[in-house]
Amino acid sequence: MKVTARQTGTATASSGGLANSGVIGTVNLGSAPIARSAYREQIRQIAPAVLLDRDTELAELAAFCAASEPAPSYTWWRAPAWAGKSALMAWFALHPPPGVRVVSFFITARYAGQNDWVAFTDLVMEQLADLLDEPMPAYLTDANRYAHLLGLLNAAAAVCRDGGERLVLLVDGLDEDRGVTAGPDAHSIAALLPEHPPAGMRIVVAGRLNPPVPTDVPARHPLRDVARVRSLKRSAHADGIRHAADRELKRLLRGSSVEQDLLGLLTAAGGGLSAADLAELTGGEEWEVEEQLYAVSGRTFTVRAGRWRAETSVYVLGHEELQQQAIRFLGPTRLDTYRQRLHLWADSYRTREWPQGTPEYLLRGYYRLLDATGDLPRMLACGTDRGRHDRMLDLTGGDAMALAEVRTVQNLFLAHEEPNVASLAVLSVRRGELEGRNAYMPTGLPAAWAAIGLVTRAEQLARSISRPEWRAEAFVGICRVLQDRGHQDLIALAQEAARAADDITLPDSIPSLAAAIAKFGLDDWADRVVREIADPLERARGFAKLAEAAAERGDHQQARRLAEEAETLARNDEDLEDRTVLLIAVARTVFALGDKERAASLTTEVAEAARGIDDPATRARTLPAIGQAVIEMGNREEGRTLIAEAEGAVLLATDARTRQGALKAIIAAAVDVDDEWAERIADGEDTEDLWDHLWICIARSAADSGDFSRTERAASEIGYAHDQTLATRVRDSCRRDKGRPGLGPTPSRSSRARRPRDRRTRCPGQSADRYRGRRRHARR
C-alpha cells in the first residue's frame, strides 16, 4: 500500500525522543527486560550442606573484604586438588558477611560451557546487571564484551560503596580455565580481572598450587604479586573422599560395557542425568543402573536433587579432577559417540513433541551441552521449539529459562560477521510470544507454589511476569508465605520485590508496595524509594503507608517521624479531598501509637473542613472516609452521623458521574456500620455498578472480620471481571490470615466479556425471598 503525505510541516524531538512530520510505520520503543540471574542456584550445587572446620578461613575472608582503605584488593587462595577449596568458596559466596555483595564464577568443566572467558563475562555481567537492576548489554560480541564487563563492574562497585556495602568478585578454579590452553588466540579469565579494582572493590581468586600465571596477564597485575597468595590447608574431610573416588573411577574405566557407558554418558552430558535417563540411553533396566550408581555415589558420582523435579535424583562427576580424568581416558572419539547418543535421544522426544515426563536434562542440561560444544543449529532448534518451551513452562511454572535460551542464541547469531537474518527473525517472533504470554498471570500464583514448598518454581514464575508492579506484588506474596517459616532466602526475595518496584514508572502503586516490602526488613529501601517520588501527594501517601507499617512492627519513633512528614506534605496540598485522605491516614497512625487526643483533634479538624465544602458531591465523597476513621477510633455514633450527613448531601448532587462516585464512598462506609443500611442506599439507585460495589465492600468487611465463608459468597456475586479481581484480592487476604495462600488477581484484558448473571441473588446471610422482595420494591 502506498501512502503519500503532503505539507506535513516540521517536527522536533529532544534527546531520546522521536520526531516525525510525515508517515511512519510501526515503531518499537520497548526496552529490554531487567536481568535476573539464577547463578546462585548453581553455586548451591557446589557448596556442601554443612561446612566443617573452616571457621578460621571464613573469618580471614571476612576480614579481607571488610578492611578499610588502603588495603590489598586481591587475595589468591591456593590448594591442591581435593583440599576442599571450592567447598569453602561456594559457602562464602552463599553466606557472605554483612555489608558484602558477592558476584562469583566457578570455573568447571563438570557443567557445560562453564570454563572459558565467554562464560565468565556472560555470567558475571548477568549478576552485575541484576545487582544494578539493568538489562544485559545488547548485541554482545567478542570485541565489546570486555568493555561492557568493566563498565558494569565500575557501576556496581560504586553503587555498593554509596550504599555502605562492598562489592566482592570471587573466581574459583583459575587453573581450570580452558582459555589458558585453548590456543594462541585464546584469552584467559585471569587477564580479564581488573588491575585496579574500582570503588573499594575486592577480588578473591582460588586455584591449585603453583599454577603458572597466564601469559596474557599484565606484568604489574596483582596476580603476579606473591604477597597476595594464601595457602589453604587440606581438609581431612575432603581427603578421604578423594582416595575412595579415585579407586572407583579406575574400576569403572576398566569395568563392564555398562559401567563404561554410564561413565561415558555422564561425562559427555556434563552431568544431570537420572537413573531413568541412563537406563533409557543404555537400554538397560533402571534398577540395574541404580544398583551400579548406588555403589559409587558420593565418591565417583555426586547425587543431587533435580533442579525442577526435586523428587528425582541426578548424577554428576564428584569432582573436577574426576571429570578431567574421565575425559582423558575416553578420548574425543568416544566422547563424540556418547554425545551423538544424547542427540538421538533428544530427537526422539522432539519427534514426540516433548510429552509429559520428558527428562529434565533435555529441557535444561542438554541446551548447556549444545552451547558448550558450539552446536548452533541445534541451539536454534531448541530456542524456537514451542512444544519444548510449553513443557518447560509446565515443569517450572515460568518462561524465564526459555527466554534466556532465546537471548543466548540471538547473541550468538549477532556475533557473526554476517548474521543469519532469517534465523534472527524467527527468534524475535518466539521471544515476543514468550514475553506476551506472561502479561496476564495471577500475581498470587507464585505464592501458592511457595506455600506448598516449591519455592524455586515460585521464583521462576514471579520472574517471568513482565510488568514490574505485578512482578513486585508476586514477590511480596512469596515473602508473606515464607516470613513465618524463617526461610533463608526471605531477604533475597524481598530484594527481588524491591528491584521490581524500582522499575515502576507510575508512582501511584509505589506507596503500598513500599510499605509491604518494608515489613520484610527493607525499611531503609522503602524510605528511600518513597522520598524519590516526585509527586508530593504520592510521596505523602507513601510516608503515611510507611508510618502505618512502622507502627505495626512496633517502631514508634520511626512511625511518628514518618507521620509528621506525611502531615506536613498533606497540609501543603491545596485539594481538600486529598488533604482529608492523608490527614485521616495520619490520624489512624497516631491513634495506633496511643495518642488518642491528637487523633481526635485531627479527625475533628478534617470533619469541620469537610462540612464546609460547598459542592454537595464533593462533600458527600469526603465525609464517609472521616466517618470510617472515627468509627475505628471508637466513636461509632459520631461516625454514623458523618456518614448520614454524606447520604443527605448526595441527594443534592446533580451530576450523574460525581453522584455515582459519592454513593460508592457512602456504601463503603455504611457497610462498616450496617449491611442493611448499605443495601438501602444501593436500592435507591439500583444500578449494576453500585450493586457490584456493594458486594466488594461486604467481601472486604467480611475478610476484615475473618468471615471467610461470607467473603467467598459475596465475591461470587460480583459481575464485572475487573471488580472480581478486587474481590479476589480481599478473599486472598482472608485466606492468608487463615494460613492459606490465595491466587490473587488475574489482570483483565479489555476484550474480556462480562459474565451474565441472574440479578435475583441474595446478600450473604439473608434469605432469597427477602432479597427478591426488596429488589421488586426497588423496581416499582
Image: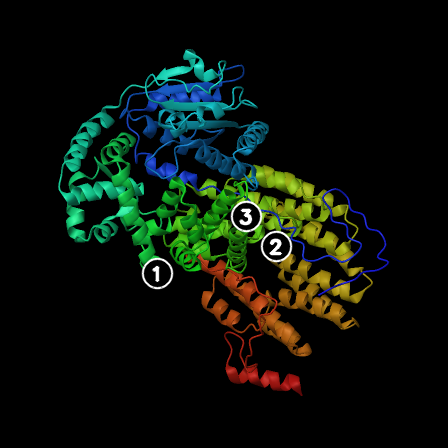
Query: Quick check: 371 above or below 98?
Result: below
User: How many other residues sit within 10 Å of disc 2, few (<14), some (14-19) or many (≥20)?
Assistant: some
Query: Quick check: 335 above or below 274?
Result: above
Evaluate if marks 1 and 2 touch, with contact meaning CB atoms under 8 Å apart.
no
Between residue 127 and residue 665, name the one nearer to us: 127
Whether residue 340 is visible here, answered yes or no, is: yes
Q: Residue furthest bottom?
A: 780
Instruction: Identify residue type, mark 2.
Output: Met
Question: Residue 242 falls in which quadrant of the image?
Answer: top left
Question: Residue 632 falls in which quadrant of the image?
Answer: bottom right
1 vs 2, front mark? 1
Instruction: Identify residue type, mark 1.
Output: Thr
From mark 1 to mark 3, how far is it between C-alphas?
47 Å
From mark 1 to mark 2, how far is it between C-alphas?
68 Å
Evaluate if marks 2 and 3 touch, with contact meaning CB atoms under 8 Å apart.
no
Instruction: Identify residue type, mark 3.
Output: Ala
Residue 446 position in % (x across, y down): 45, 54
Q: In this image, 533 relative to 110: left or right?
A: right
Q: In this image, 526 relative to 654: left or right?
A: left
Query: Quick check: 659 above or below 61?
Result: below
Which residue is label 3 attached to? 516
Mark 2, secondary structure of its residue: loop
Residue 275 position in % (x across, y down): 23, 49
Residue ID at (50%, 75%)? 765
Residue ID at (73%, 46%)? 17
Query: Quick check: 649 above or below 548?
Result: below
User: How many other residues sit within 10 Å of disc 3, few (<14), some (14-19) or many (≥20)?
Assistant: many
Between residue 359 and residue 551, name the one nearer to us: 359
* Mark closer to the chain start, 1 or 3: 1
Residue ID at (40%, 45%)? 375
Which residue is label 2 attached to? 633
